[in-house]
């Protein structure tokens, strides 16, 4: 079984890409809703949650854990790889594909404050983006709108418009969705942006990596069962889960 976790439901965008690529593999999603959002939390706290969630998934039978969260990957990938005996696949904002995509040499990155202030992100920009201008925007409050299931309402629209304004003023032609929640805002983003702006979502690339690691680990296709749990209240998380995943699942409570 392949386990996924995120601070909340954003990682479903990654699990969707994996489910499309490996429809027969059994998947287990853990939403750490009780501690959502991770963005404003300290690195130590996010690291602690990463270990708790990953151990929980392994205890449930995960043979591979996908950290479907940029903020948790930034804070905890090294410690997870050192502590756990199963392979760990993480995420990072798609700076490399953005550099390949930009025609004007100006790229915007939407992510949480935690991801953008982390050492991993600094290394990524230093390594790949020396010839390109990278403008970052920490998007406080957006994760909460998505967790509330508000993908298109006036509050979400206003917030997103506010975060896009500095990027559009700079004339970026490529925007990296550096948080796994944001691909769920794609329809709204498409409405708010000119058609020549390219959106970069690393979900499909991560799914390819998951497929490679799953094959190397000897994980074989089964019945394609999808299970889910939350550290929050299953009854209140279930409707938004169903909305984002596109199917009603019964969620269990995870005590971790
Ligand atoms: N989906 C998480 C990410 O990719 C959101 C983090 C948060 O909870 O603030 O960064």
Image (cartoon, rainbow, N blue to C red):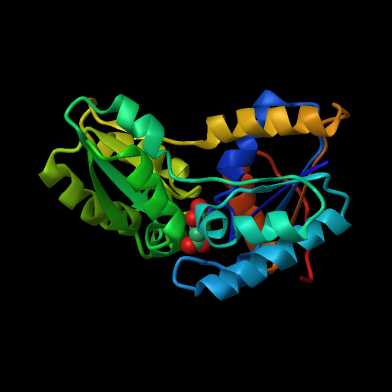
Count of numbered tags: 0
Instruction: State the residue in front, 198 or 98.
Output: 98
Q: Quadrant of the N terminus?
A: top right
Instruction: State the residue in front, 232 or 176.
Output: 176
Q: Which residue is pictured at 68% across the width and 34% down the height?
A: 210
What is the quadrant of residue 106 in the picture? Answer: top left
User: Is 175 situated left or right of 182 in this image?
Assistant: left
The answer to whether residue 31 is visible is: no
Residue 210 lies, with reference to residue 233, above or below; the image says above
Q: Which residue is pictured at 46% across the width and 50% down the height?
A: 179
User: Is 160 situated left or right of 254 in this image?
Assistant: left
Residue 180 lies, with reference to residue 112, above or below; the image says above
What is the quadrant of residue 176 in the picture? Answer: top left
The answer to whether residue 213 is visible is: yes
Image location (x, y in percent) of residue 69 = 56, 52
Q: Which residue is pictured at 46% across the width and 54% down the height?
A: 120
What is the quadrant of residue 231 in the picture? Answer: bottom right
Residue 179 lies, with reference to residue 23, above or below; the image says below
Q: Quadrant of the C terminus?
A: bottom right
Image location (x, y in percent) of residue 214 = 77, 32
Image location (x, y in percent) of residue 83 = 75, 61
User: Is 59 situated left or right of 78 in this image?
Assistant: right
């Amino acid at each position: 079984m392949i386990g996924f976790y995120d601070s909340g439901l954003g990682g479903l965008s990654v699990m969707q890409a994996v489910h499309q690529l490996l429809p027969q593999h059994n998947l287990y999603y853990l939403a750490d809703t009780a501690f959502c959002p991770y963005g404003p939390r300290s690195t130590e706290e996010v690291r602690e949650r990463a270990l708790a969630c990953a151990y929980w998934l392994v205890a449930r039978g995960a043979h591979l854990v996908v950290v479907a969260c940029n903020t948790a990957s930034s804070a905890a990938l090294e410690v997870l790889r050192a502590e756990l005996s199963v392979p760990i696949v993480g995420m990072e904002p798609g700076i490399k594909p953005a550099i390949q995509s930009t025609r004007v040499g100006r790229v915007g990155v939407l992510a949480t404050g935690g991801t953008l202030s982390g050492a991993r992100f600094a290394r990524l920009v230093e390594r790949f983006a020396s010839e390109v201008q990278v403008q970052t925007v920490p998007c406080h409050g957006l994760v909460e709108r998505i967790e509330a299931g508000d993908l298109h309402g006036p509050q979400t629209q206003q917030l997103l418009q506010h975060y896009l304004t500095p990027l559009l003023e700079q004339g970026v032609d490529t925007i990296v969705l550096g948080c796994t929640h944001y691909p769920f805002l794609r329809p709204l983003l498409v409405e708010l942006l000119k058609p020549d702006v390219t959106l970069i979502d690393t979900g499909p690339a991560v799914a390819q990596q998951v497929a490679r690691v799953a094959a190397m680990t000897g994980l074989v296709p089964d019945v394609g069962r999808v299970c889910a749990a939350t550290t929050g209240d299953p009854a209140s998380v279930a409707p938004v889960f169903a909305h984002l995943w596109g199917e009603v699942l019964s969620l269990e409570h995870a005590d971790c």
